[in-house]
Image: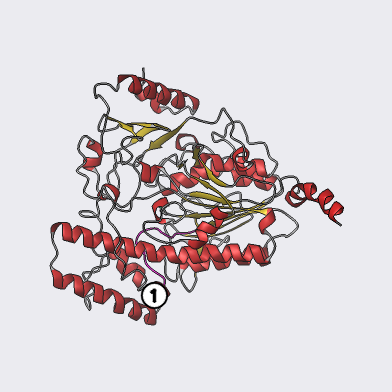
Amino acid sequence: MKKELLYLLPLLPAAVAGQGRYNIVYIMTDDHTAQMMSCYDKRYVETPNLDRIAADGVKFVNSYVANSLSGPSRACMLTGKHSHKNGFTNNEHGIFDGTQQTMPKLLQKAGYQTAIIGKWHLVSLPTGFDYWNIVPGQGDYYNPNFITMDNDTVVERGYLTNIITDKSIDWMENQRDKSKPFILFIHHKACHRNWLPEMKYLTLYEDKTFPLPETFYDDYEGRIAAQQQQMSIARDIDRTDDVKIYRPGMESPLGPTHLGMLSRMDKADLMRYCYVYDSISNDFLSRHLEGKALAEFKYQRYMRDYAKVLKSLDDNVGRVLDYLEKKGMLDSTLVVYTSDQGFYMGEHGWFDKRFMYEESLSTPLVMRLPKGLEARGDIEEMVQNIDYAPTFLELAGVKPPKDMQGRSLVPLLEGKHPRDWRKSVYYHYYEYPAEHMVKRHYGVRTDRYKLIHFYNDIDAWELYDLKNDPHELHNLYGQPGMEKVTKQMRRELRKLQEEYDDPIRNQYPLD
Ligand SMILES: [Ca+2]
């Protein structure tokens, strides 16, 4: 008996994997950041189900996006290319060209079933999917609309995060062809603005006071672009739509977004919602807060509502894991969890993303690994969302096309550490002038330094030593003693711009 087992064991991974034909469940949230995920950061909330993914696999601790914004990030992920190559540089004017090569199309060709459920946000309708069911634009939390493959808009009853999960499990259980491997993209709206909670979590975290991040009162000295942004919690967060303060009983002080979202609720739910948020508003209005007290009140509101929305998300990720476990699919399925980018939870005084600073350049990335992929724990190599497409293709036994700019993460998932792994990542953000007024910029990050050039209607360079200044408060560009590092970083930036063929290098040539 013992002898037989020993004989069988080495064959198991290959048999289960079926020559690399893993299923892939890719869960992507919106604006969820590593600070709000307990396997990355224990200061604020517990996310036991997200942590389960990392506990049975890997956690990337140097995981970055190429362009910190919803649509562009999704386009980078689907194509394995930077924004200037996939054509979707910003949300304001972007329409994704669905005729181009994408990872789902290549997986389809390789015999995979492909499906996407939830937020799409690329304007044109999905291509390369055997099944899709998406929310229009940003989607709504309550009783949301969905667009079907017939291009009909249908209202679904309930809370969006639950519905996306219901539909995803239903597709896996009842709708797919079970003789084929599949990739399922579960794309949540959570934790996107305006952070409207599920009914059962209306009062969760209301007794919790979140600690202020160290840089909440940053004065942006030496950083011109940061001085000109409009994403401050103290000044720019919307008092009604985001913070949900209004004069109870009156309709007119409600902001248009907030009012529109609440108008979708069932009457009984709306009454329960108002019962909670009326009392918060009344309390606020009676206190006449100003200055720092007002800023910190807004911060607590923001953190609490964000955390409530995240709680439903964590529950629903748990439901997907439980389903895969119950069906015995975990050994043959790669489960990926990531966000379309990171987010500021009060660091530098901000909400939102866009900047190449650490909180929004980074994105959480954990993977639960199937049999045959042996890596465990933290992976330190620098990875980027353009790497996902080549990774999934390699796992499906497809050679990633040469024009894909990302690199397959499969060696890292096998526990290897290739010596020629990238030593830097390239970033380029385009959406200006636009909401939050973050200037256009591009830059390079190595393990220790970061160089950023803000361009278009300004010309400002920033250089950070992340080892000695992890919060990026001290711009060292042009400082005495930094000449050698600056030269090296400019050279690295030029190398990446050439490698990725970004035409911006013709406009701002680097020596
Ligand atoms: Ca986003």
Residue 211 image position (x, y, % from top left): 29, 58
Residue corresponding to mark 1: 265
Q: How is the rendered protein coloured?
A: secondary structure
Report the side of 434 relative to 427 (left or right): left
429 and 421: which one is in front? 421
Q: Check if residue 39 falls in the magenta segment.
A: no
The front one of 28 and 2 is 2
The total of numbered circles placed on residues is 1
Question: What residue lies at 67% left-to-right and 48% top-to-bottom?
Answer: 108
x 44%, y 51%: residue: 40
Classify residue 270 by image quadrant: bottom left
Range shown magenta: 188-198
Which three-letter amino acid code belongs to the residue tagged 1?
Met
Q: Is residue 372 above or below residue 427?
A: below
Q: Quadrant of the C terminus?
A: top left
Is most of the magenta stretch helix, strand or loop?
A: loop
Tell me if I can see residue 154 in this picture. no
Depth order, front residue of 69/473: 473
Tell me if residue 423 comes above or below residue 36 in the rendering: above
Q: Quadrant of residue 325?
A: bottom right
Q: Position of residue 465 (x, y in %)?
A: 33, 32
**Residue 60 rendering spot, x and y as whole percentages:** 51, 45
